[in-house]
Image (cartoon, helix red, strand yellow):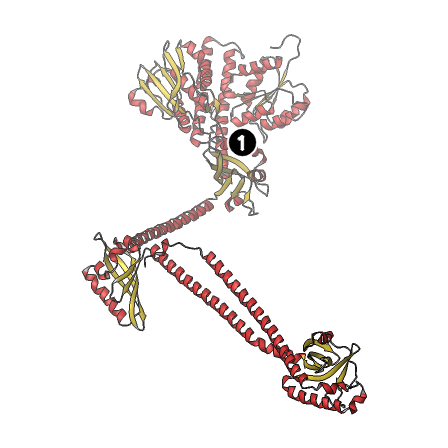
Amino acid sequence: MTKGKTKPKTILIVEDEKPLLDAISIKMQKSGYETVSARTVEQALNYLNDIQKINVIWLDHYLLGKESGLDFLVKIKGDKNYKDIPVFVVSNTAGHDKITSYLNLGAVKFYVKAEKRLDEIINDINKYITN
Amino acid sequence: MISTEKNQVHTPPQKKNYISKIIFLLGLLVIILGGISATVYVKKEAEYSSKEELAKISDIASAAVNPKRLTTLQGNDEDLKNPDYQRLKEQLVLINKALKTFDAKWIYLIKNENEKWFFAVDPLDETSPDYTPPGEPYEDYPKELDSVFTKETTVVIGPYSDQWGEFISAFSPIKDLESGKILAVLGVDIETKFWRAKVWESLVLPIIISLFVLILWIVFFVYRDKRIKNEKEIKSREDRFRSITEAMKDVVFRLNSDGKIIYISPAAKEALGFSQEEMLGRKIDEFASGSEHQKIKNSFERLYQGSSIDHIHVALRCKDGKKIQTDINVVAIRRENKIVEIQGVVHDITLEKEREEEIEGQNERLKKSQEAILNILEDVEKEKETSKKLAERLKLATQSAGIGIFEWDISRDILTWDMQIENLFGNKRKKLKGTIGTWTEENIYPEDKPKVKTEIQKALQSSSKFDTVYRAVLPNKSTRYIRTCAAISRNKNNNPIKAIGVSWDVTHEMEVDKAKTEFVSLASHQLRTPLSAINWYAEMLINGDAGKLSKEQKQYVQEIYNGNQRMVELVNSLLNVSRLELGTFSVEPELLDIKMIAEENIKQMEPDVKKKKIKLSKNYSRNLPKMMLDKKLTNIIIQNILSNAIKYTPEKGKVNLAINREGKFIKITVSDTGLGIPINQQDKIFSKLFRADNVRETDTEGTGLGLYIIKSIVDNVGGKINFTSEQNKGTTFNILIPLTGMIKKEGTKTLN
C-alpha cells in the first residue's frame, strides 16, 4: 500500500482475455495502482511511449495479434528507456522453455495464472516495487 | 686290413721330404761341380797334350834342318841367291807337307842377332802375299820366344796374336852340333782355332758323361718323388676309405670268390651286434634267415652271370635274434673277367620303413586336416557371403530409411561417414572424411552447437549413450532436425577409442511433437483462462472487493472457489497425462540430493499436516548418494505420493516417509495409517481417473490421476512402484528409482 504523499504507481497490464484484464485492473486499483491496459504488443508499446511513468508491467504470454508477450519483452529490453521497468509474467502456459526464456530476458517472476491468487501476485509486486 | 701302422713311429712327412730334397740338391751340386771340374781338367789336359804334340812335331822338324846351312845365311836379300837358303827352304817345304796332317799353318826359321829377331827362311813362295823375305824383322814377336835361349829346348807358346793372326807356336832351337850354340829357331804355328777345336773335341766325352750322370740323378729323384707321392696318395685314400667306412652306419663288407667275408666295417657291431672278428670268414647267408637265402643266392647268380652291380632287399638276423630290414648293394670286382672279390654295403632300412609308415599316417592325418580346413574355409566363405548380404541389406535399409552411418576414430580424430550422411546434411561434395570439430562447425545450427558439443563431451566422459536432437544447417541455409545416436567403444583403460553412430531426419517428428505440444499448450491455455477468471473474481468477492457479503453469500462463493480449485487441479493433471501419453515430455536429469527434494515437499505440505494434526515422521538412511534426477519429475512423484498419504489419512493419523537403498535402487517408502485400498480394487489403482469406492464415499477430493502419473513417470525413468494396503489400516507405497539415475529423454515440454 502506498503511503500518504507518494505518487501512486502506474502498472501496465498486458493481457488479452477481457474478464481477466478487468479483474486484474480492479484488484490493482483497489491496491492503489493506476492501471493501463493493453491487449496487443502494439498497444502496449504505444502506451509505454505515451505514458512516461510506467512503474511495472504485468505481462501475459498469449496476446491478441501475431506477437506474444515474449516479443514484447524482447522489444522493451532492447530499449534503454524501458529496459529497467520490472516485468511480471503471468500466464497460463507453463512450458519450461518459455519460463526460461522470460526469466533469461529479465522478467522478475513467472506465475501460472490458474495456480495463483491475485492477492499473492500483487503482494509480490508491491514488495518488489517498494524495495 | 686292420691297421697296424697306427703304432709305428712316424717321422713326420715334411722332415723326410726336407732331407731328400737336400740330398738331391747336394747330389746335383756334386755332379755339376764334378762335371765342370772334370771338363776343366780334361780341357787342360787336352791343351797340354796338344801343345806337347806340337812341341814334338817341332822337335822332329827342327832335327830335320841342317844346321851347317844356317851358318851361311846373311839375313838379307842376298840369301835368296844362296843355295843353302834354297836348300833350307826346300827342307821346310817338305817338312810342311809332312806336317800338313797336323794343321800347321806356318813353319819358318828365325834368327836372333843383337837381341832382335828376324826371319831367316820362309817356305812360302816369293810371290805369296804372306811371304816374308829373309832379314825381315819379327817385330811383335811373343816375348816367351826369348826363353828358347834360356831353356835351350822347344818352347810352346800361345795362344798369342801377331800381325798374321792368332797362333799357338812351337819354337825349337837348332843348335850347332859342335858348339851347341843356337843358330836359329824353327817355328811351327798352328792357328789357335784349330788348336782349340782339338781341345774341344776332347771335352765332348766328359761333358756327355756328366750330363748323363746329371740326368740319371734327376730322373732318379723325380721317379722316387713320384713313387712316394703315389704311395702317399694310396695311403690317404686308404685312410679316407677306412674312416668313411668306419664312420658309416652302413656296413661295408668284402667277400672273396667263395663268398666268405674278408672284411667287414666296425658298423657291423652296431647294426647286427656281431663284432668284426665274429663275422670274418663267415658267409653272408649265415646272418640271414632261411627264407632270405634264396634272395642272396639269386643276387650272386646274377653277378656271376655278368652283372657288375646288384641290389637286394634282405632281412638280416642280429645277434640278439632281432630282425632288421636291410638294403644290400654289391659290386663284383673282376680281374681278367673272373670275379676275385665282391664288395658291398648294407643299409639298415628298418627305421626308414617305420618312418615311411609314420609319414603315411601323418599324410593321412594331414589330408584329413586339409579337408577339415577346406570345409571351414567353405563355411567362412558362406559366412562372408551372408555378412556381405547383411551389410548390403543394412546399407539398403539405412539408405531407404534415410539413415546415415558414421564412424569416429576418437584417438586420431578421424570422422568418416557415408553418402547418406552427406544427403542428410545436404552436402554434395562427396567428401566422406574429416574431423569432428570441422564437421560440427560446418553442419550444425549455430544455436545448437554448444548443446551438441556438451553432449559429445558428456558421452565421452561418462558411459552414457549419445542421443541428441539438433538442427542441421544445410548449404542452402535451410534447417532440419537431425537425431544422432552413437555408441562408444572403449579400451581396457576405459578410454574412448571409437564411436559408431547413425543419424536421421526427425524434422517431421519434431514438427509433430511441436504440433502436439502446441496443442497441449493451447488447450491448457484455453482451459485455464476461464478457470483463472472464476478464481480471481471469486477471490475478490470473498475478499470483499465488491462490497461486503453476507455470511451465506460468502459461503456460496467459497463453494464456487473450491469447485474451481478442483477444476484447476484436474486440468493440470489432465495436461500432464496428455503430455505423458503424447510422449512429448522431457527428462532432464541432474545430480540432486533426493533428501532435499523430499524435505521441500514436506515443508509445502506442512499446512495440511498441521490442520489434520497428522504425525509426520521421516526416515532417511545415511550415505544416500546424490543421483541423476529430473527435479520436476521427482517433485511430482514425491508430492503426489505424500499428498495422497496425507489426504487419505484421517485426523491424528501417522504418515512416514523413508528413503533408503535397496539393491541397485533408491527406495522411497511412504506409509500411512489411512483408509487403505480395498483388495478387489487394488488392481485398478494405477488406472487413469480411477478412485476407489471407499475414498469416493468420503469427502476427500482427488482427480484419480495422481497414481497414474506417478506410475507413468516411474516407468519412463526406469524405476518401479508397488504397494501394500489394507482397508482401514493403512497403505504403504514403495517407489524404486535406479541408482544409475533417471535416463535422459528429449522432449518438447516438461510436466507441470
Q: Tag 1: Cα neighbours inside 10 Å, few (<14), some, or many (≥20)?
A: few
Left or right: B399 in relation to A105: left
B446 vs B529, nearest the viewer: B446
- Residue B122 visible (yes or no): no
B605 vs B96, nearest the viewer: B96
x 21%, y 60%: residue:
B286
Quarter of the image for the N terminus of chain B: give it.
Answer: bottom left
State whether residue B365 is above or below residue B414: below
Q: Position of residue B523 (x, y in %)?
A: 48, 28
- Most distant residue in the front direction: B178
Left or right: B228 in relation to A40: left
Q: Position of residue B159 (x, y in %)?
A: 68, 76
x 23%, y 64%: residue:
B296
- Residue B600 visible (yes or no): yes
A40 vs B460, nearest the viewer: B460
Q: Quadrant of residue B704?
A: top left
State whether residue A39 is above or below residue B614: below
Q: Mark 1 — on which chain does it sit?
A: B
B136 vs B349, nearest the viewer: B136
Q: Which residue is mark 1?
A: B454
Q: Position of residue B274 (x, y in %)?
A: 25, 54
